[in-house]
């Protein structure tokens, strides 16, 4: 299994001391290895972590997520290379501007990889303040690169190139029987993670946990924010065959292989798209009506009735109620409780079919210190639940 840590487009803030104090505080609680067997992954299960240049992933890592995952019995290695700064097709950097800023993308990436001779065997230590500073610099720099809208789409070149790179990384891990865990970050990243999973496992299904459907197309999006559009590209809906995305993302997901849980803020055009494509959705109304146990059972029965398909779980923390995870870009009240969110992860883990996990939209730049700490902690515990942590 690998851990892929990416983030884009959001400003950074240093984690508070009190958040650091909590490092690993609830790690595993003496948890033994998962009791279920992996149906699709190679043993021994392995983590190869991958760090991006933004704060969401590094906050989760600082909180001790890697150790927590190791504690669950996964092997873990950590690759702190910056996510979208190497071999990236989107690199329209005027040389003079690069010189003026005192940083080039390539140089920026090098500074992100900190060689710490004091703890060479402890990969967690490779995320530190130097990395954050360098990452902030690179991120700020990348965000200044010219990337005018295409149609309605904002930052299309940046999003496309990041997702393309990510899809290759995820595909590579998945093909080796390793589970990529992507921490974000903007949910547009799921365009990359799911494209990568589907390339390695064409029969896979997707369980998308979110307050939002993220299924606008470039033609229907009002805001032009691509984090509201990734699903439409994966399905190949009308309007998604546009540059720069059509250079790499192919329709790879069938509507019947996708199921949503947690929806409660869906645009009118998205409602039409969901209806027309007959996509199974369990809204918060359904969670209220049936209870989360039944909802997850029905969701799995829809996309993976015989338990023989690999599952990609894409979990947007805004699916949970703002009282659970407030530090996220688009909170919507009336969401999943703490336990409902964790139950989903636990139940999917128990199937043994999970092959890829996204924990998305943790944004430590939003909300009070308490909110940030709580949201980071929830991001970690959701990941642990999906990776086999149980209550007993
Ligand atoms: Mn989302």
Image (spheres, helix red, strand yellow):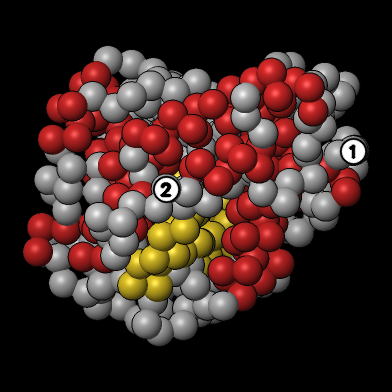
Looking at the picture, tell me which residue is in the foreground, 21 or 230. 21
Q: CA distance from mark 2 to mark 1?
A: 35 Å
- Position of 354 with respect to 175 (left or right) is left
The kind of secondary structure element at disc 1 is loop
Residue 180's disc number = none
**Residue 19 visible in the shown view:** yes
Q: Is residue 35 above or below residue 70?
A: below
Front-most of residues 300 and 388: 388
At x 52%, y 77%, the residue is 177
Identify residue for label 1: 243
Of all residues, the one furthest to the bottom in this rendering is 43
- At x 72%, y 51%, the residue is 87
Q: Is residue 281 visible?
A: no
N-term mark: 2 or 1 = 2
- The residue that mark 2 highlights is 114
Question: Circle 2 sits in a helix, a strand or a loop, which is it?
Answer: loop
* Residue count near mark 2 (Cα–Cα under 10 Å), binned few <14, some 14–19, many ≥20: some
Badges 2 and 1: C-beta atoms under 8 Å apart?
A: no
Residue 149's x, y, as percent?
82, 20
């Amino acid at each position: 299994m690998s851990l892929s840590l990416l983030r884009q487009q959001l400003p950074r803030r240093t984690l508070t001391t009190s958040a650091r104090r909590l490092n690993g505080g609830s790690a595993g609680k003496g948890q033994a290895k998962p009791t279920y067997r992996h149906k699709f992954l190679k043993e021994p299960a392995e983590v190869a972590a991958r760090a991006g240049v933004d704060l969401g992933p590094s906050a989760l890592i600082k909180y001790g997520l890697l150790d927590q995952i190791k504690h669950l019995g996964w092997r873990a290695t950590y690759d702190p290379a910056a996510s979208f700064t190497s071999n990236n097709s989107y690199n329209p950097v005027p040389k003079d501007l690069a010189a003026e800023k005192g940083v080039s993308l390539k140089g920026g990436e090098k500074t992100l990889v900190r060689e710490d001779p004091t703890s060479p065997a402890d990969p967690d230590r490779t995320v530190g303040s130097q990395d954050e500073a360098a990452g902030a610099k690179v991120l700020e720099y990348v965000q200044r690169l010219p990337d005018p809208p295409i149609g309605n789409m904002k930052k299309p070149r940046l999003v496309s190139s990041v997702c393309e790179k990510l899809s290759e990384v995820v595909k590579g891990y998945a093909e080796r029987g390793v589970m990529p865990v992507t921490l974000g970050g903007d949910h547009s990243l799921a365009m990359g993670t799911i494209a990568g999973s589907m390339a390695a496992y064409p029969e896979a299904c997707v369980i998308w946990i979110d307050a939002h459907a993220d299924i606008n197309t470039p033609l229907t999006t009002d805001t032009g924010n691509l984090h509201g559009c990734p699903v439409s590209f994966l399905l190949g809906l009308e309007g998604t065959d546009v540059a720069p995305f059509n250079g790499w993302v192919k329709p790879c997901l069938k509507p019947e292989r996708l199921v949503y849980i947690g929806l409660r803020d869906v645009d009118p055009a998205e409602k039409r798209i969901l209806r027309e494509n007959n996509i199974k959705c369990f809204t918060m109304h359904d969670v209220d009506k049936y209870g989360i146990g039944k909802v997850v059972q029905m969701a799995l029965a829809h996309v993976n009735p015989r338990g023989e398909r690999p599952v990609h779980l894409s979990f947007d923390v805004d699916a949970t109620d703002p009282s659970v995870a407030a530090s996220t870009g688009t909170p919507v009240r009336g969401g999943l409780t703490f336990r409902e969110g964790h139950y989903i992860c636990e139940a999917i883990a128990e199937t043994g079919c999970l092959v890829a996990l996204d924990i998305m939209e943790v944004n430590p730049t939003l909300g009070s210190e308490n909110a940030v700490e709580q949201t980071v902690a929830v991001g970690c515990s959701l990941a642990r639940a999906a990776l086999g942590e149980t209550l007993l």
